[in-house]
Amino acid sequence: MMKHYILNLNPTAKHEWDRYILRDPLTAKRPDIAKLIAEAVGADTGSYLVSVKIEVTVLEEAAVPPVEQLSLPFPEVNINSSRREAA
């Protein structure tokens, strides 16, 4: 059984579950690996000792665009002209 997924890696993600995300390229749903294995085994009730081979081949790598920092324009304020000296 050959399946294709999109893997997003973000080691600096705030939450552990957002660091490694595996998604279906068409539906964007996260795959249920146990369900995929069960489908390969069949529909008979029972317990199975299974061997699962995961072979990973990178087909394409999409570059992550650099994060842009927003700069907010602040008007210049001359603090000295509005301050009075105490006598």
Image: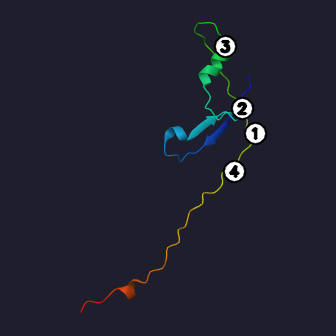
The structure residue drawn at horizontal position 63% and vertical position 7%, both measured from the top left corner, is 44
Q: Is residue 52 above or below residue 43?
A: below
Is residue 24 found left or right of 80 in the rendered image? Answer: right
Question: Residue 29's x, y, as percent?
Answer: 62, 32
| Local secondary structure at mark 3 | helix
Q: Secondary structure at mark 2?
A: loop
Asked where in the image residue 59 lies, by quadrant, the reply is top right
| Residue at image location 72% in from the left, 28% down from the top | 3
- Say which of 12 and 24 sits in front: 24
| Position above or below: 17 against 76 | above
Amino acid carrying label 1: it is: Leu
Residue type, mark 4 in image:
Ala
| Residue occupied by mark 1 | 59
Distance in Å between CA atoms under marks 3 and 1: 27 Å
In the rendered structure, which disc, 4 or 2, sits on the residue that comes first in sequence?
2
Q: Residue at x 67, y 11 (%)?
A: 42
Q: Which mark is residue 41?
A: 3
Position of residue 34 measured from the top left corner of the image (x, y, whole percent): 60, 21
Give whichever of discs 2 and 1 has the lower sequence position. Answer: 2
Structural crowding at the residue carrying mark 1, measured as other residues with C-alpha within 10 Å and reported as few (<14), some (14–19) or many (≥20): few
- In contact (CB < 8 Å): disc 3 and disc 2: no
Q: Which residue lies under the disc numbered 2? A: 4
Q: Is residue 38 visible?
A: yes
Q: Is residue 51 visible?
A: no
The residue tagged 4 is: 63
Task: Please say if the residues under marks 2 and 1 sit with CB atoms less than 8 Å apart.
Answer: yes
Q: Locate residue 22, reporting x and y percent.
A: 62, 35
Task: Estimate the x, y position of residue 75 in percent, counting from the top left.
Answer: 49, 77
Q: CA distance from mark 3 to mark 4?
A: 37 Å
Which residue: 60% across, 60% down? 68
Mark 4: which secondary structure? loop
